[in-house]
Amino acid sequence: MVIAFCLYAFMVPMFFWVGRDLRNMQEFFFQMAGTILVTFNFLIFNNRSKFKVNVISIIIFSFLVYNIIQFTLCGMRIGSTIILNLLIASIIYYIMTSINKEYTRKILDMIIAVCAINFVYIFLQKIHFDFIYVVRGPNGTTLPDVFEPIGFLGLSSWTGMFMGIGMIASCIISPFMSICFLPMLYLSKSMGAIAGTFSGMLFYLFWMKRKAFYVILPAMVVAASCYFVLVDNPMGMTGTRPPMWKMALKDTIYGLNLHNPQFQSPFLRNPVLGFGVDSWGKGIVKYFKEVDGNTTIRGFNGLNGLVDNENRPFKRSNDGYILSPAGKRLDYWDNPHCLPVQIFYEYGFIGWAMLVMLIYFMMKRFVSSVKSHELIIISSILICIFISSLTQFPIWTARIGYLVPIMLGLFVLYTEPEQEQDNSLRYGRVFQ
């Protein structure tokens, strides 16, 4: 079973299919590999594993049920893929809460191995050798002489976030090894990856190397600030997200288009329930940013195609851009790039309450637990992913999101009371 888990941890972020969208294919592989892993576990080991019933498990189960309720309220039109992903992730989480703790080192080794292979591939891309990706310009035109150091993960920000997780995971071998990951973080061009990684590393140092923490803290603050001012801010993305967040939050609070039932289920579109599961990506309301500014434009994908508030149609330019009714070139926000905003938009105050309760009870368990080296690394990785989620969306992509149920399960395993941990080891031996 340990081999199956290691292959799963290694293959999900590395999977690709030539000529197909990377995000969709990785999600497909996550679903298929997760289903095989879960089925293999239950067929081979039947019911010999012991699932932990605790507050965190109840919150996860409640969130899955809440998604099914929302799926029903929206007429079962959108959200089935999200429910499938959550179901697979929930079962993997429950399995992880009852495994042998020896799995932890092997899973961390697989994360480090993925990073090592990406190190090599990024080097090849830097010397203009790329046998997978082709950089495309406006209107899909191929740019054969342009090479991006993105590794196997397909996007510099995702590479940066995964490398940040690998940076923390490498502390299981030696904290000094984490220094090797700093160049990869710089190449990510993502403040979310920098902030998440530094937050996770500082948490690790605080608990494991307290003197080093006080020395490195100001250095990391200065480095992150310089990166924001000199690298991230000049790219022009800093001012683009807040106007979109403001509009999306306001639309949720005031129940956008409650008077027009063709746009959304009458049972949703309110601050209590939000717009419904997967409503940002596949719902009627769409958000765009003007290419030449930070203005956010709202559109509705209704019966007459994409229109604005006054039912004026959007158009498409010859160079591939979507044009607003006023003729402005637009970029589409396929994700809000902020976990709290997306949770509130899709799940309302109920979703926020579940998120807050999850964080609260995780903190409570951590405070009362034995601070082992493995637990600190697991907690640091979870912090890294969460902080990165404030400006990116790693949880919603398979290449990084697949780690969340694994790390959550391990977190619960390591924060069980001492007597229950002994029982978990007894039940975990059947996996050897």
Image (cartoon, grey):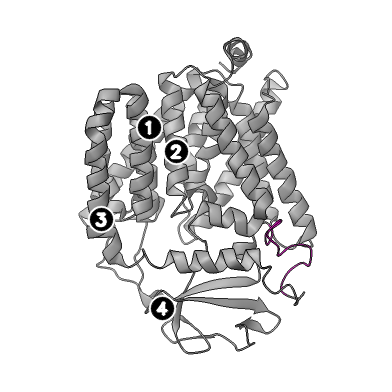
On the image, the x and y values in percent for residue 303 come to: 71, 81
Q: Kindly identify which numbered label has been placed on residue 64.
A: none
Is residue 259 rendered to the left or right of residue 81? right
The residue where tag 2 is placed is 383
Q: Residues within 10 Å of mark 1 (few under 14, many from 20)?
A: many
**Marked residue nearer the N-terminal end (2 or 4):** 4
User: Of helix, strand and loop, which mostly describes the magenta segment?
Assistant: loop
Q: Identify the amino acid type marked 3.
A: Phe
Quarter-of-image position of residue 138: bottom left
Q: Earlier in the sequence, mark 2 or mark 3?
A: 3
Nearest the viewer among 239 and 146 is: 239
Q: Nearer the viewer, residue 416 or 171?
A: 416
- What residue is shown with label 3? 129
Residue 352 is covered by the magenta coloring: no
State left or right for residue 6 relative to residue 184.
right
Check whether the beta carbons of the residues at disc 1 and disc 4 lie within 8 A of each other. Answer: no
Q: Amino acid at mark 1?
A: Phe
Residue stretch rendered in magenta on the structure: 263-276
Write the residue at 41% across / 68% down: 240
Mark 3 neighbour class, 10 Å CA radius: few under 14, some 14 to 19, many 20 or more: few
Q: Are marks 2 and 1 in contact (CB under 8 Å)?
A: yes
Disc 2 marks which amino acid? Ile
- In space, the residues marked 2 and 4 are separated at their CA atoms by 38 Å
Please, what secondary structure does the residue beneath circle 3 have? Answer: loop
Say whether residue 13 is visible: no
Q: CA distance from mark 4 to mark 3?
A: 24 Å
Quickly name the residue at label 4: 139
Q: Disc 1 marks which residue?
A: 203
User: Which quadrant, please, contains the N terminus?
Assistant: top right
Residue sitting at x 61%, y 45%: 31
In this rendering, the count of numbered labels is 4
Give x and y (percent) for residue 188. Answer: 31, 52
